[in-house]
Image: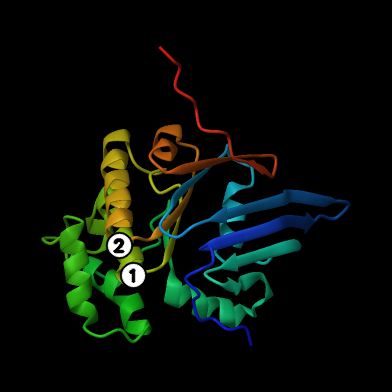
Amino acid sequence: MTDLNSDRQHPMLRVSNLTHRVSLETDTLTILQGVSLEINRGESVAIVGRSGSGKTTLLGLLAGLDTPSEGTVELDGSVISKLSEDERAKLRARRVGFVFQSFQLLPALTALENVMLPLELAGMEEPEKRARELLERVGLGERLSHTPRQLSGGEQQRVAIARAFASEPVILFADEPTGNLDNRTGQAVSDLLMALNREQGTTLIMVTHDEHLAGRCGRQFHIEAGVLTEPEPARELAH
């Protein structure tokens, strides 16, 4: 079994020659081709691309939700592309947080219960105290007993962000985190996401088509037709 103990000397994420193909009835579709990158601890990174560019597929592979056709993904010292499905699930539970465009809250649970659930499953001490603290931090201290149906879209996403940070992940993946929100609410949610990222020192990787949101990250990658590139930073003009 692969050793899951963390070595602080390696990058948080190292990807080498990642390729992903899907077999169709009469052909093979290449979704990602030869993707390589390294992301250090505590960095905030945006992967920008249009719909169908392969960015969500890439995010799933980086998080160990799927396995590539070729290449390797090393997350916090573990080559997750070589782990079993159970091993990948254990690693995600211990080290990875997720924020989705569609919030992914359990409709029958209150805001407090949605945040507590992963803490309880992980066997963490005082899950209710931790959940309350985070919900207060995201401005929902008065909405603890409300179910998702009783919350606005922005409030639901704030619950989802509290849940994602509750287990203190070393890396957080966000898939279009403001995609279902209006501009004002999306701005508030992105402010919160970036603030929590800085406070907890979490490595943040998000996929988005929003250039403004991407610009708030320390690094940006562009993806088109499954090929990933990192544009050089813009140089200031000399006066």
Q: Is residue 68 above or below residue 232?
A: below
Report if residue 27 is visible in the image: yes
Spatial separation of the CA atoms under disc 2 and disc 1: 7 Å
Q: Residue furthest top?
A: 239
Q: Residue furthest left?
A: 142
Tell me the SS state at disc 1. loop
Q: Which residue is mark 1?
A: 168
Tell me the SS state at disc 2. helix
Q: Are marks 2 and 1 in contact (CB under 8 Å)?
A: yes
Residue type pointed to by label 1: Glu
* Residue that appears at 76% across and 57% down: 22
Image-quadrant location for residue 188? top left
Is residue 201 rendered to the left or right of residue 229?
A: left
Q: Position of residue 64 (x, y in %)?
A: 58, 67
* Residue that appears at 61% across and 72% down: 80
Q: Is residue 134 above or below residue 220?
A: below
Label 2 neighbourhood size at 10 Å, few (<14), some (14-19), many (20+)? few
Q: Position of residue 235 (x, y in %)?
A: 49, 25
Label 1 neighbourhood size at 10 Å, few (<14), some (14-19), many (20+)? some
Q: Position of residue 169 (x, y in %)?
A: 39, 68
* Residue that appears at 61% across and 52% down: 37
Residue type pointed to by label 2: Gln
